[in-house]
Image: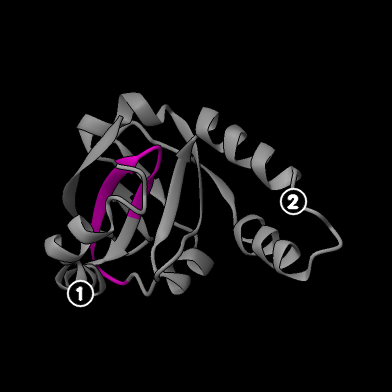
Amino acid sequence: MLMGEYEHTLDTKGRISMPAKLRKDMGDTFVLTKGLDGCLFAFSKGEWLNFEEKLKTLPLSDKNARNFVRFFLAGATECEIDKQGRFLIPNNLREAASLEKEAIIIGVGTRLEIWDKSTWNEKDKEISADEIAENMTMLGI
């Protein structure tokens, strides 16, 4: 299971280190795409295949479904971890997540989220333990 919060810096070429604790679960290659809430999503190859299967079941006749599929697939790219444990975030994805220098990588179970540090700090402040507790029953937890 992917979990934890890791702070890293992008180099001038747009490369960032994959946290050592996450490398085994992510594998040597993984898929990176636009995520929700202003971050990027990173999926191991296996999790990406699961996600793709779900996307394939969405009806082409539904405009929202088509937009959903476009959102995730148009910018998706396969990333490879180099010998120094880094991977390149393409420019289009760096722009999508407003990534410039400081980034936060968080594990959220089946995927990683890559955030601009200041955006993550704002999002993290919005997360209320009390509100989450109130909604746990609705989520079946």
* Residues rendered magenta in the picture: 100-113
| Magenta run includes residue 22 | no
Q: Amino acid at mark 1?
A: Ser
Q: Which residue is mark 2?
A: 58
Q: What colouring style does the render use?
A: one colour
The x and y percentages for residue 98 are 37, 75
The x and y percentages for residue 63 are 77, 70
What whole-number distance in Å separates the C-alpha atoms at marks 2 and 1?
34 Å
Residue depicted at x 69% and y 62%: 70
Residue depicted at x 45% and y 74%: 95
The x and y percentages for residue 89 are 43, 56
Q: What crowding class fits label 1: few (fewer than 14 Cα within 10 Å), some (14-19), or many (20 or more)?
A: some
Closest to the observer, 8 or 57: 57
Residue 27 falls in which quadrant of the image? top left
Quick one: label 2 or label 1, which is nearer the N terminus?
A: 2
Q: Amino acid at mark 2?
A: Leu
Closest to the observer, 89 or 26: 26
For mark 2, give the secondary structure.
loop
Task: Say if 101 sits above or below 81 in the image.
Answer: below
Q: Disc 2 vs disc 1: Cβ atoms closer than 8 Å?
A: no
The x and y percentages for residue 107 are 28, 43
| Magenta run includes residue 109 | yes
Residue depicted at x 18% and y 56%: 133
Q: Which mark is residue 118?
A: 1
Taking the image as shown, residue 9 lies to the left or right of residue 97, namely: left
Residue depicted at x 51% and y 33%: 47
Mainly helix, strand or loop, the magenta region? strand
Q: Quadrant of the C terminus?
A: top left
